Amino acid sequence: MADQSYNAAWRMAEEMKSRARAAQPSRQPGALKMLGAWMVFGILLMLGSVLALFFILLGWAMMPLVRHRMKKQANRQGHTWQGQTATSGGHNTLEGEYEIRRDPHAQHP
């Protein structure tokens, strides 16, 4: 094989490697940087956990309020809480219910 020192591309690649090694002082971050990164990560993790717990508790606390408002709205519309029509004489059709009426004057086969 020919000597690589005569190859211009090889020499250029070696020079670039040596310049890159000189420009990069150390591959390992300092202990202080690592400690700081772990501290920031830990603080963000704790903050996220506290926020998640807060929103879960807020949701649980609001459940009775939402249930009360839904009951009130159902009573205003004349429905019981279970979604059935109240027995108030008037005929209300709930969504999804239908009745097939036959024409009494039509001739059925």
Image (spheres, helix red, strand yellow):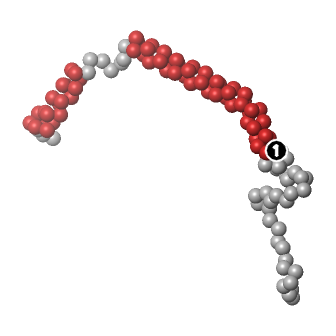
Task: Say whether residue 40 is left or right of residue 55.
Answer: left
Q: Position of residue 73 (x, y in %)?
A: 76, 43
Residue located 79% across and 57% down the image = 94
- Depth check, front residue: 109 or 48: 109
Q: Position of residue 80 (x, y in %)?
A: 85, 47
Residue located 78% across and 36% down the image = 68
Q: Amino acid at mark 1?
A: Asn
Secondary structure found at label 1: helix
Q: Is residue 6 visible?
A: yes
Q: Position of residue 7 (x, y in %)?
A: 11, 38
Residue located 10% across and 37% down the image = 8
Task: Say whether residue 8 is left or right of residue 62.
Answer: left
Residue located 84% across and 79% down the image = 103
Reply above or below: 3 against 96: above
- Depth check, front residue: 53 or 77: 77
Reply above or below: 61 against 67: above
Tell me the quarter of the picture where residue 9 sits.
top left
Q: Which residue is mark 1?
A: 75
